[in-house]
Image (cartoon, grey):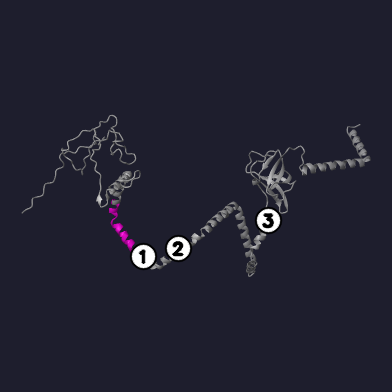
Amino acid sequence: MSALERPARLLVGTVSAVRARRSAVSAVALALTLVVGVGYLVFGSLGVNPAAETMRVRVHLADSGGLLAGQNVTLRGVPIGKVESVQLAGAGLVATAVIDAATAVPADGEVRVASLSLAGEQYLDFRPDRDGGPYLADGAEIAVERTSTPTPLWKTLSQLDSTLAQVDPAQLAAVVNELGVGPEGPEKLADLLDSGIFLASTLDSVLPQTVSLIRDSRQVLGTVRDLAPGLGDFAADMNVALTGVEAKSGGYVELLNAAPGTLRALDALLAQNSPNAAALLGNLGVVADTTGPRVPAFREFFFPTERAGSTLDAIAVAFHDGGVWGLVNLYPRYACDYDLPRRPPSLPDFPEPYLYTYCQDNDPSVLIRGARNAPRPPGIEIPGAPPPGEPADRQATPTPIGPLSLPLTFAGPPLPPPPPAPQR
């Protein structure tokens, strides 16, 4: 017996047995086909997986938006579960979504009821703002503030009816008649519709900014409405003012005609005095640099900022009732004695001043007003005791002698000769 004879006999015997029992074999084949088809529909098409883990999330909605139990739950459009139920709860509804536990759904973002087409086919779509955690867990609650539903058809038709109610049929008929006058009417209407579509798409791309503009405009227009009486008074006053200006228009014309000559004369005056004006401005700059830091002292003399009354105020108080009034104190007042060498006042010399002249008595009850209390520019040191190692009687550095210096010799500079005596 060859090697192929035994398999061939087995195959022929099997075929003969199946042929003899072909009715039973056909029934078993049909049953297997039915089981495979049902399994494919349940596990393949319907996505039923008894072994899969799920979680339930409660989504609070203001209205259903056409959402029903059994519809899809998606994550950015990708199916991840089913809507188990939609039930009334207080002032809104609660949709229970059964989601595959293996899908990580971020806990923030918007949840909305969307439609596949105008015919309906609503589904619950999760639109998170990010991809990271935290994620939704079993029993999570989505607040109604984070949900949205599509505008129902009845509301759209109602708003469309309100819009059409504002259209005047007579004006619309006039527009249609104008479009039908020439052969270019259909093209014009097509351009008009295309422009309207472009405008609507542009406004849709900037919808948040458009809504904000409308909201702000409402506030502005409300404010203008509240100010309407004041604006009316302002308009009346402006009418009176402009009427007066109109009455004097001749004088304004004469003024404008004379302005060129006046400006030319002013320009010539500035041209003639420009060298002197430059020197004057330089001198004024020096004066400003000198007096600017001493503004506190000027304020004490003219306009006091810390005490009631200035030096000029004190002088002005003495003049009243047609006379000059004053107070005389017969008692001697305390005076500070500076501990420095004294020169005889009869000597006609010109010594340099001492650097450290200050009152050593710090008692506030007897301290006289002097350089220590005088206002001074910021950063200027207040006179006081000499620094360590400095003599108390140090004098200022002698003034350098220049070509324009006036020599101060003993008893004063030489005087010019006296003029000759008059002849008699």
Q: Earlier in the sequence, mark 2 or mark 1?
A: 2
**According to the image, label 3 marks what residue?**
155
- Mark 2: which secondary structure? helix
User: Which secondary structure is most common in the magenta stretch?
Assistant: helix
Q: Quadrant of residue 84?
A: top right
In the rendered structure, find residue 217 and report the number of the disc placed on it.
none
Q: Residue at x 77, y 42 (%)?
A: 44
Q: Quadrant of residue 24?
A: top right
Considering only vertical position in the picture, is 67 above or below 175?
above
Horizontal side of residue 245 vs 145, given as left or right:
left
Mark 1 to mark 3 CA distance (whole Å): 68 Å
Amino acid type of disc 3?
Lys
How many C-alpha atoms fall within 10 Å of the one at disc 1: few (<14), some, or many (≥20)? few
Q: Quadrant of the N terminus?
A: top right
Q: Position of residue 367 (x, y in %)?
A: 29, 36
Horizontal side of residue 190 vs 235, given as left or right:
right
Mark 2 to mark 1 CA distance (whole Å): 25 Å
Nearer to me, 372 or 15: 372
Start-end of magenta stretch: 251-279
Comparing labels 2 and 1, the label whose residue is closer to the camera: 2
The number of callouts visible is 3
Q: Residue at x 30, y 51 (%)?
A: 281
Amino acid type of disc 1?
Leu
* Residue 102 on the magenta segment: no
Q: Position of residue 251 (x, y in %)?
A: 37, 67
* Residue 162 visible at all: yes
**According to the image, label 1 marks what residue?**
255
Q: Position of residue 290 (x, y in %)?
A: 30, 45
**According to the image, label 2 marks what residue?**
237
Mark 3 to mark 2 CA distance (whole Å): 50 Å
